[in-house]
């Protein structure tokens, strides 16, 4: 018999008190993959409200050339 273990639910880092800002590309790089695409919620662990905020900040950083549009 195979026993299944539940994965521990990821906690939204922004709800826990960490901040994300478009002026800090090092933090934003955690939320994009190697091709430059924005990672989904199930990978980042962010809640839906903060996932939209993260996407908005990444797009702002791309527009002022802090992050590339693609690799």
Image (spheres, rainbow, N blue to C red):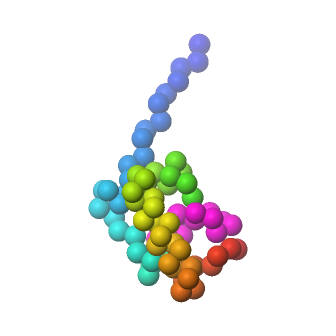
Q: Residue furthest top?
A: 1
Which residue occupies the foreground of this view, 60 or 21? 60
Residue 9 is situated, as x and y percent measured from the top left of the image, at: 42, 41
Q: Is residue 43 above or below residue 36?
A: above
Q: Is residue 5 above or below residue 39?
A: above
Report if residue 27 lies within the magenta region. yes
Q: Quadrant of the N terminus?
A: top right
The residue lying at 42 percent from left, 65 percent from top is 53
The residue lying at 53 percent from left, 86 percent from top is 64
Q: Residue 53, can we see it?
A: yes
Which residue occupies the foreground of this view, 36 or 6? 36
Report if residue 34 lies within the magenta region. yes
Which residue occupies the foreground of this view, 5 or 48? 48
The residue lying at 50 percent from left, 52 percent from top is 41
* Count of all numbered marks drawn on residues in the image: 0
Q: Residue 26, can we see it?
A: no
Q: Which residues are magenta?
A: 26-38
Residue 33 is situated, as x and y percent measured from the top left of the image, at: 62, 63
Residue 21 is situated, as x and y percent measured from the top left of the image, at: 40, 75
Q: Residue furthest bottom?
A: 64
- Name the side, left or right, on which 2 lies relative to 6: right
The residue lying at 42 percent from left, 46 percent from top is 10
């Amino acid at each position: 018999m195979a026993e299944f273990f539940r994965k521990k639910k990821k906690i939204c880092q922004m709800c826990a008190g960490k901040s994300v800002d478009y002026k800090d590309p090092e933090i934003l790089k955690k939320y994009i993959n190697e091709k430059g695409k924005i990672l989904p919620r199930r990978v980042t662990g962010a809640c839906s409200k903060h996932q939209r905020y993260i996407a908005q900040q990444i797009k702002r950083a791309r527009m002022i050339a802090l992050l590339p549009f693609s690799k």
